[in-house]
Amino acid sequence: MIHCRPIRLGEPQQALLVTELHNDRLLRALRREPVDRTPVWIMRQAGRYLPEYRRVRAQAGSFMALCRNPELACQVTLQPLERYPLDAAILFSDILTVPDAMGLGLYFAEGEGPRFERPVRSTREIANLAQPDIASELRYVTDAIALIRRELSGRVPLIGFSGSPWTLATYMVEGGSSREFRRIKTLLYDHPRALHQLLDRVVQAVTDYLNAQIEAGAQALMIFDTWGGTLAHEAYLEFSLDPARRIIEALRRDTPDGRVPVILFTKGGGLWLDALAEVGADAIGLDWSVDIARARQRIGARAALQGNLDPCVLYGAPEVIRREVRRVLEAYGPHPGHVFNLGHGIHPEVDPERVSVMVEAVRELSAHIHDS
Amino acid sequence: MIHCRPIRLGEPQQALLVTELHNDRLLRALRREPVDRTPVWIMRQAGRYLPEYRRVRAQAGSFMALCRNPELACQVTLQPLERYPLDAAILFSDILTVPDAMGLGLYFAEGEGPRFERPVRSTREIANLAQPDIASELRYVTDAIALIRRELSGRVPLIGFSGSPWTLATYMVEGGSSREFRRIKTLLYDHPRALHQLLDRVVQAVTDYLNAQIEAGAQALMIFDTWGGTLAHEAYLEFSLDPARRIIEALRRDTPDGRVPVILFTKGGGLWLDALAEVGADAIGLDWSVDIARARQRIGARAALQGNLDPCVLYGAPEVIRREVRRVLEAYGPHPGHVFNLGHGIHPEVDPERVSVMVEAVRELSAHIHDS
């Protein structure tokens, strides 16, 4: 069992930042510098596929109680690092903490995914939306980050994150997951100015939030645009990519530890790689539908790439996992700038032993690639 | 109310084929010939958004009972043509009739989409799968086609269709819709030869089925690859696109009415346009995430394009619908080879009046484009 000692109030946070980083492969790859092997981490690596996670989750009572408890969030953040030689930790939290802090009331209905008690549907409700005081409302997140940084003590870098403005807006307007996105799309087509007003507020809040994460010790940031791929081409550029760009531009990324890199991931964003390469992100996350060899040729030196194994490969036999890992690594090739990951979050029913096979395969096979 | 008189047994079917086609815009556009205006039809145009459809559906008792009754299938096929000046009829049926004919037992659970009573999961079950006698098992489809052709009497062409082999295989193995596609992906990664064996059987059955549709009077064919976009790049080429190519190659498309064009639609297939252009389809269906201007430049003279309005635009106000229709038409431009459609099936909750706005906008605006 991993335990995270609570931070003492008044403890100087700055002191936490200047720990030496023992494993900087992730940050080197994100800066497109040479590495001895390809860094690997897993989207949702702290999560339901791990029995030790399910125990802590049960102890916390609810998913949000777990997110809101810095000690428990720290504990589950570190769990996958105890099992696997991963090259990064990622803050255990949810992509929807910002709209929750804006007063929408995030909760998780059993088996249904995230929902909001008070969705924002009318132009009046958008106009009345409060700009949250991130520093106080989301203190539980920055406390967790500071705690995780201390417990990691430089073992690997810590990634902070948020949902993208478009993705947050879809949940805020729909009230939860959606198949059609009827409400937000109607807003987009019929009342684009109201949607921009909503997005502007979310951009401001997410910017504050990610800046607070940097201040608390996040060493890399990821923006998850889960629902960007549901948009028509021009709507994607206007309502998903541009708000994300404005956040990236407004981040205060220079820290005593160096410049904090940003990874931008649009699920289904393979059609928009050229546009994604121009918004100032250090790396672009790819889902598994993208041919990473062609993506690398297309993007060139404009950004690093993260991904992109089909998460279902982890249901396969060990030799199949090794074969598919090799395929992704060889497709990217010996060039700098690859962070190995799944093309989406790990499925909850994956056997943790198979994850071990994947991580070991990346370590072993990529060492040969970078050696050659 | 539309009524379709039953076909008399022994009626010479060949006589039905040589009706003069009064509106051949669809076929001309699919052949990339000039048209006076862009032809328009709507995926799932005969469907739940129409109150007259819901009445016949209730009368039939179940969705499959409606599909299996040629007179009622004819009736609902013609309904949207009574309301709107569409340029094509599409057979009312389901994409999964072939696996149903293979003995899997297709049914529709309320609000859950299609399911199979007897999914095919093991390599043994795949090996034991019967090759169906399409001519007799799917006689209800060919009877419906012959009946619709007679009732249309050349007003517009009739499109026949099937699901793609990959899409049929996903339902056959999963037993219904899926979020993760765990079972079929495990088969794909762990037992690719067994999956190929399954796909080979489906390719043969779908080929027989589409050839029977041509013989019965289908004047164009569409292959719906609903789930191709869930595949990794190389897996898409091997397990979705190649089986579709083999069907297209094996179709007997030369008829007394001329050569029957084929439209291939992969939802989420925008990444694979180059590969799609090489499989022998006359047209490629595009979902709404694709920039149709760039797709046209990329595809050039290799294929016509069908699409690709976001289906959610039909929830918008009339002036918004007109604006978005114009955007798609202008993006394609005055070049030959565009068939206007939604980027996916029409949503069941759309107001039929809004469909009218869309169809009228295509007629009016495209006439100017082709005039210039």
Image (spheres, coloured by chain):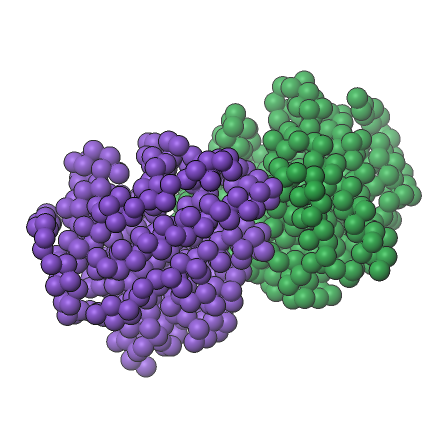
Chain colours: A purple, B green
In this view, which residue lies farthest toward the bottom? A372
| Residue at 57% in and 61% down | B272
- Please indicate, yes or no, whether residue B2 appears anywhere in the rendered image: yes
Q: Is residue B22 left or right of residue A41?
A: right
With respect to residue B61, does A198 lie above or below? Answer: below
Quarter-of-image position of residue B52: top right
x, y percentage for residue B238? 52, 59
Nearer-the-camera pick, A311 or A260: A260
Q: Quadrant of the C terminus of chain B?
A: bottom right
x, y percentage for residue B191? 41, 52
Nearer-the-camera pick, B144 or A83: A83
- Please indicate, yes or no, whether residue A330 appears anywhere in the rendered image: no
x, y percentage for residue B2? 80, 24
With respect to residue B153, does A43 lie above or below? Answer: below
In this view, which residue lies farthest toward the right? B20
Q: Is residue A49 left or right of residue B132?
A: left
| Residue at 30% in and 78% down | A34
Nearer-the-camera pick, B280 or B126: B280
| Residue at 49% in and 53% down | A240
Q: Is residue A254 left or right of residue A83?
A: right
Q: Quadrant of the N terminus of chain B?
A: top right
Nearer-the-camera pick, B348 or A83: B348
With respect to residue B19, does A365 lie above or below? Answer: below
x, y percentage for residue A232? 58, 51
| Residue at 79% in and 54% down | B29
State the count of labels.
Answer: 0
